Structures are given as structure tokens and as C-alpha cells.
Image (cartoon, rainbow, N blue to C red):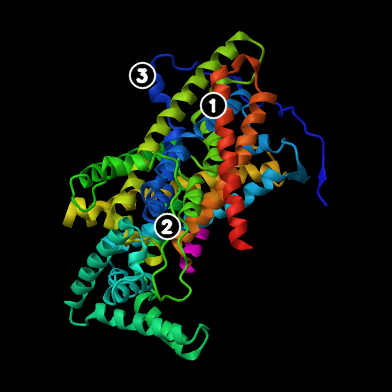
Amino acid sequence: MAKVVPNKFSPPPDLRNKGDILDPPTRRRDILRSIGPGLIIAGSLVGSGELIATTKTGAQAGILLLWLIILGCVIKVFVQVEIGRHTITHGETILSALNRLPGPRIRVNWIVWYSFVMMAASIGGMGAVVGGVGQALALAFPITGDYSQAIQLPSELELKRYIAWGNDIGTGGGELAKLTADEQERIHLGQALFRDRLSRLDQKADRRGSRALVAVTDLIAAEHLNQDPTQASTATAKARVDALLEPITLDDQYWAVLVTLITVVLLYFGRYRLIQSLAIVLVGLFTLVTIGNVFTLQFHDTFRLSASEILSGLQFRLPPIGTVPPGIVDWQVVQPLATALMTFGIIGIGGMELGIYPYWCLEKGYARFTGPRTQEASWARRASGWMRVVRYDAFISMVLYTATTVAFFVMGVAVMHKQGLDPTGMRMVSTLLEQYVPAFGEYAHWLFLFGAIAVLGSTFLIGNAGIARLLTDALKVSRLIKSTEPKTHERTVVWFSVAQPIIALVIFATGVDLVGLVLFNGLVQALMLPLMGLAALHFRYREIDRRLMPGRWWDRMLLLSSLGLFIAGGWLAFSTLVRVF
């Protein structure tokens, strides 16, 4: 059984080199030139956090959770800066610091063990990201054309919903009448748009739309007759639907392999500046396109959001659970709040990114330039100066990713929620593409695909680079590799940088639900957030250098930030346990 040992509050010896000391910039222009770690974090978030999880939350919840999305971005920055302060002060990595927190130990602290779980979930999330890049490239540049052909057909769930509500409306709309006026309007709009989509498919010689409709109708009938899905008639109908709607495709896998190989090469030979430059350019371009899309949607009669609708999203209300289409057996009810809380873990700066941020600060040089801590006034002056750069970096990045996150959320509400669309599985990217069609029409296809390729590719690159550093540090803290040998550290980072993308590719190739991977990663990271809040408070009140102490206003905001992370993580843990048990 794990034993509780006394907490050791003393950080390890400061091994920073005096030869690396550099005075911090003082002019605002020079400070802005020195920022970077936060932008790298923003680059790693837009792919899985904003593009996938945030838009899915908007699609499921509607506008009512806008307040939670904004809160999820803003609340974490105070914990982020406090962790950065600890890095500047002691020059140590986050896992080394977490290993000193109170609690049970089996070789290392229990929080370090949980970080291994978080890293494993994050590698799974990278599987979803490389799958998304593969899907986007398969649509933009088909090789055999099998993937682009397959996703033209709707999913089984989309067809079931269309058939169920169509039958209800055709027989008087008894179930539809029980819903709110807004919900009825949303279902009518979704039915009309879906009917047009099937009509376009039927214009082709093979009439694939009608074939899919008949196959799913037969499956619904079989499920009503046989509640057991293993019954022969149900299994046969299900196999027929899967063969038509969920075929095995190769184009997306071919492209995913190529993206993985390119990522491995970049991470093997690349360094900080290359990764930073790619992140800034790619994220910036797609962010501008997305924000422009949101503004353009306001001029579209069908998809615009009124001022009253937007204000309703800021009123701290919770959305209802999803609607069950009438007559459908074993329909999985949508839980918008659960999706939002999982998204909370990866939007803005997530649990993994809070852990990775100090590594980028070390590589950027903030902590290294400060030099080993001494009682000299010159050290305090340098540390205060570099802390100012950290604050600029964190808050500018927070403004950037908050604006981006809100744009993706509003886009998901305006387009996908109103149509009843929900990105999942092999149609993840093609469903997300629909958000750009009302504004950009025939150009939406190329605008979105190039943006998705850029952003998801950036996420895959930066995410794997960060996880490699965290895993290497975990091995050092666990004393599985020597912590004092720079060459061993570099070799281990390179090894993980090569291995992780390949593991992520294998995960994607298994056919697991991509959005499910992203949300599971969000769940694990959301549960890590309270632990990072606890660590930040410990750093502030037990290990801070008094010369770097913040003011009362900062302390209050740090306490509120940590409390918010405890509430969100605790709520998610409770709701997850309730659903499981």
C-alpha cells in the first residue's frame, strides 16, 4: 500500500548556468518580440480544443454555454502565470515541482502518476488530430477517391433522426408539438436541409441517398422487432447499413501516414524557433478566416444570431439534455453540459498545456536568462523583468485563444446547432466544413480544408513536441534516466518525438471514434486542472521568493482561478461517476 511521507518543501539545487544570464527587455516593443511560449500553446489548442471540441459543444448545447466557454479560457491564465513564476524562481520543470506536493507516493508523487495517465490520453488525442488532418487532405487531394465518396452519405444517426421526425411530422407531429418553439423551428430547418441533401445525392445514377434511406429504415424496423442487437435480422440490417455508410477507406489513412512521417522529420531535426514560427503563422491565418466567417454569418438570415440570443449565452444558465427522436431504440441522449465540461479541460490552456508551459519557458530562455537564484539585488531585478515578459506572453495569448474559442463556439451554434449537425467519426471534418458553407459558398471547401490542414497539422506537431518533453521529465523525476545529463535528456526527447506520432497514427488506424478521443482527452485534462490549481497555490504560499511576491489583487484572482478549476473538475468527476455507475 502507498505510504504517506512528510512533504519536502525545499526545491532541488538550482543548476542554471551563470553564463546564460541575460537582462530582460524593458521597452514594450522588445517585450512583445520576446513572447512565444503562450503562442505555441495557442497553436497546440486550436486543433483539438477549438476546431473539434468547442464546435461540438456549440452544436450540442446552443448558445446557452457561451459563458462557460469564456470562463474556461480566462480562468486558467492566473494559474499559468503562477507556474511560470515558479519556473523563473527555481529553474525547475513542473513534474519535479509536483513531485514535492503532499500525498501518497509509490516511487513518485501521486500527481506525477496521474500525469502519466494524462499524457497517454493526450497521445490518444493526437490520434484524433492526425486522423483529422488525413480526412482533410483526403477531401482536398483524393488519391483513390474512396474517402470523399464515402462521406457524401449521411451517418446512421443523422438518417435515423431524419426518418423519426419525418414520420412524426407526417402523422400530425404529436411528439414535435411537445417541444419548445425554438426546438421545433430547429428540427424543421434541419429536416428541410437534410431533404435537399438527399435529393442532391439521388441525382446520381446509383441513387445512393434513397438506398441509404431504405437501409436505415429497415434497420429501425428490425430494432423494433428485436430489441437484442445480436438477433439475426437486426445484425444483418446493421451490417448492410455499416457497409453502405461506414466503409473502410484508405485515402485518409494514406495521408495520415504522410503527415506522421513529416512530423517525425520536423521534430527530429527541428528546434524551438521553427515550431514557434509555424504555430504563429498557421494559427493566425485560420483564426482570421474563422472570425471573418462568424461576422459574415450575421448577414445570413437563416444562421445569424440576434443580440438577445448572444446575451442569453452570458446568463449562467445550463442547457437541457438532447431530444430523443420518436420511435428510435437505444438512442444515446446528448449531454451538452458533460461535453462542455470535457471541452473545458482543453480549451484556452488545458491541464496538459499548464504542464508543458514551463518547458517552453525554459527553452525560450526566460528561466535560463534569469540565472541561478541568489540573494543579490541583480537577480531579483532580472527575475522581475522576465516575470513581466511571462505576464505579457500569458495574457496576450489568452486574448488570442479566447477570441478564437468564442468564434468557433458561435460558429458551431449558428450553423451546426440550428441544423442538428454533430461532428463525429469518419465525418468529423466534413461536418465541421459545413460551418463555412453559408458564408463562403463554393469557396468554403478549399478555405476550410486548407485551414484545417494547417491548424490540425500545427496541433499535431506542437502537441507531440510538448508531450515528448513532459514524458522525458517524467522519466527523470521517476529516476528512470539520469536527470543531470543534457545529452540523455535530448536523446530521450528525440526518441519520444519520433515514437509518439507513430503511436498516434496506429490509434487512428484502429478506427476508434475521433471526436470521442478528443473528448476523453478533455475529460482527463479537466480532472488534472484542480491538481494544477493546488500546485499553483502551493508554489505561491510555500515556495515563492518574497522578492517576487504579487499584490493582493493577484492573490485574490489566483484563489478564484484555483477555486473555479476545483469546481469544474469536481463537477465533471461527479457527473462522470453518475453516468458510469
Disc 1 element: helix
Name the amino acid, label 1.
Answer: Met
Name the amino acid, label 2.
Answer: Val
Give percent across and percent down for residue 363: 52, 33
10 Å neighbourhood of mark 1: few (<14), some, or many (≥20)?
A: some
Instruction: Say if mark 1 contacts mark 3, CB within 8 Å.
Output: no
Q: Quadrant of residue 202?
A: bottom left
Q: Residue at x 37, y 73 (%)?
A: 156
Disc 1/disc 3 C-alpha distance (Å): 27 Å
Q: Is residue 527 visible?
A: no
Residue under pointer 2: 130
Residue under pointer 3: 29
Instruction: Say if mark 2 contacts mark 1, CB within 8 Å.
Output: no
The quadrant of the picture occupied by the C terminus is bottom right
Bounds of the magenta segment:
502-511
Residue under pointer 1: 557
